[in-house]
Image (tube, rainbow, N blue to C red):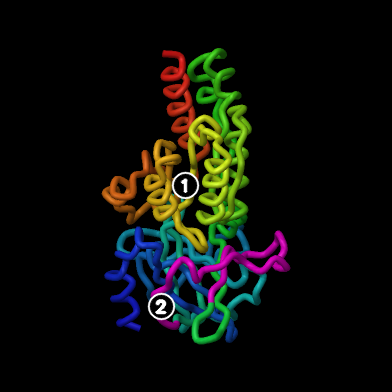
Amino acid sequence: MAGVMDEVNQRTRLVGHNRLELLLFRLGSRQRFGINVFKIQEVIKCPPLTHVPRSHPVVRGMAHMRGKTIPVMDLGLAIGEPALKDHVGSFIIITEYNRSIQGFLVSGVDRIVNMKWETILPPPKGAGNNSYMTAVTHVDNDLVEIIDVEKVLAEVSGTVTEVSSAVLQSGGAAAAERRTHQHILVVDDSSVARKQIVRTLDQLGVTCTVACDGRQALTLLQKLADEEVSVTEHFAMVISDVEMPEMDGYTLTTEIRRDPRLKDLYVMLHTSLSGVFNAALVQKVGANTFLPKFHADDLAQNVIKHLDELSSAQAA
């Protein structure tokens, strides 16, 4: 176990090369699940938990660690699996998602595997809208399910998707009217994340097209360019997740910059990789900006800022 924990702390340098490392774990059965090592702060044996009255049923308690108190969720129960009967002897995967730190209770931790994003595939079409899978892959000829943690957190903790009136009114009525003529490409593999972003853009009066991964988005952009459509006039900007099956957001940005027809597109990387994010990597791949998920006002303000600058440039 110490070896796995050492690897979690040290092996987070593959991002930007269309590769990732998955920590494989189990939730009480033979089925293995995966989580990106880049999201993990630590893996520990489950300590004593403090019960919190009237907390969500998925929250098994609070753990007190290094001067911090974090919620511990039964990940199996959160995705419809049986609850772990006894957390003694189990493990907690401590993660940072969407600007928050939480622990996920799992029955066992397997090992870390190095993968290419091309081998991370969308869930089977028959999985349905209620599935908690955001992607799947194969390890040792076994199917590994990658969980849509953003969906779990949205259901347990809730997410504010309303943009404040102060942000909506920024720039005045004329600026708001100009934004309604803009169109944005949204790229994210999580259905929950896509809905959150689209909801935010809807409140700004901005229309959008959605893609489920970087490969799909790049194909769409290149198809428009092949049809001699001015892509930078068609899309005011691209809002892309980083972690996606088949092609990650860093590689998508790199490919956009390599194509002379697409290279001037404004790209915002919008990702739950908030705690360990390397700002230099954004510059390396050529993204214009980075924004941690998910805060409706922050996203709206960044979109408004760019769209207003774009309108001013077009009017000049």
Magenta-drawn segment: 110-137
Identify the disc placed on residue 185.
Answer: none
Q: Residue at x 37, y 43 (%)?
A: 287
Location of residue 297 in the rendering, given as x and y in whole percent from the top left corner? 50, 34
Residue at mark 1: 293
Foreground residue among 127 and 156: 127
Image quarter in which the N terminus is found: bottom left
Q: Amino acid at mark 1?
A: Lys
- Residue 129 part of the magenta segment: yes
Label 2 crowd bin: few (<14), some (14–19), many (20+), radius 10 Å: some
Name above or below for residue 183 compared with residue 278: above
Image quarter in which the C terminus is found: top left
Label 1 crowd bin: few (<14), some (14–19), many (20+), radius 10 Å: many
Q: Is residue 284 visible?
A: yes
Is 138 on the left or on the right of 264, as rendered? right
- Residue 180 part of the magenta segment: no
Location of residue 130 in the rendering, given as x and y in whole percent from the top left corner? 70, 61
